[in-house]
Image (cartoon, grey):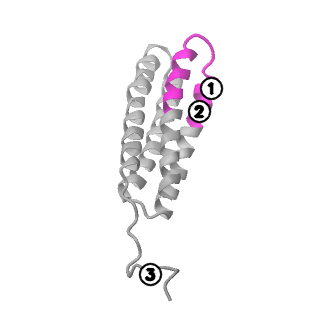
């Protein structure tokens, strides 16, 4: 489970970087890829939290994974609120979308860093070997 979690953590970091790329390129075209990838950034950490819990990984990794999903939900609320307000007020509120979005790669990096340094599980006690009689 540790290797699976590490792989998911690396994938999350890659997806988050791609999300920033699509946000920037969307300024000159369509935000559809940015919007679609947002669903992945919400769903993937939920899967990661489940894998971490099933693998009995540290609670910190479970919590940080859930935090990314929560921060993604905040992003949606900010975008919807800005759209509802419209005009210059909506534009000011939408600026928070970019600022709060900076927290997501920071937390994703913490997850990846912690996942890379997870200790290996301890060997079973007794050192029984299948070849022993």
Q: Nearer the viewer, residue 128 or 11?
A: 128
Say which residue label 2 marks. Answer: 37
Q: Residue furthest top?
A: 28
Q: Main secondary structure of the magenta part?
A: helix
Question: How much space separates mark 3 and mark 1, taking CA atoms?
Answer: 53 Å
Of badges 3 and 1, nearer the viewer stands 3
Q: Is residue 3 above or below residue 15?
A: below
Say which residue label 1 marks. Answer: 33
Residue occupying image coordinates x 38% and y 82%: 126
Give left or right: position of 19 versus 105. Answer: right
Q: Which residues are magenta?
A: 16-39
Helix, strand or loop for disc 1: helix
Residue occupying image coordinates x 53% and y 24%: 83
Q: Nearer the viewer, residue 14 or 87?
A: 14
Question: How much space separates mark 2 and mark 1, taking CA atoms?
Answer: 6 Å
Q: Is residue 123 above or below residue 9?
A: below
Q: Is residue 31 magenta?
A: yes
Say which residue label 3 marks. Answer: 128
Q: Nearer the viewer, residue 64 or 12?
A: 12
Rate crowding at label 3 as few (under 14), some (14 to 19) or many (20 or more) other CA atoms within 10 Å.
few
């Amino acid at each position: 489970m540790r290797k699976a979690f590490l792989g998911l953590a690396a994938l999350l970091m890659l997806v988050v970087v791609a999300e920033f790329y699509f946000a920037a390129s969307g300024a000159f075209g369509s935000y559809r890829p940015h919007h679609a990838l947002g669903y992945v950034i919400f769903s993937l950490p939920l899967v990661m939290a489940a894998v971490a819990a099933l693998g009995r990984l540290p609670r910190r990794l479970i919590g940080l994974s859930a935090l990314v999903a929560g921060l993604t939900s905040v992003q949606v609320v900010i975008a919807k609120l800005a759209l509802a307000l419209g005009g210059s007020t909506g534009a000011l509120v939408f600026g928070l979308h970019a600022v709060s979005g900076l927290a997501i790669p920071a937390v994703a990096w913490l997850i990846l860093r912690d996942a890379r340094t997870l200790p290996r599980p301890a060997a079973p006690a007794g050192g029984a070997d299948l070849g022993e009689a």
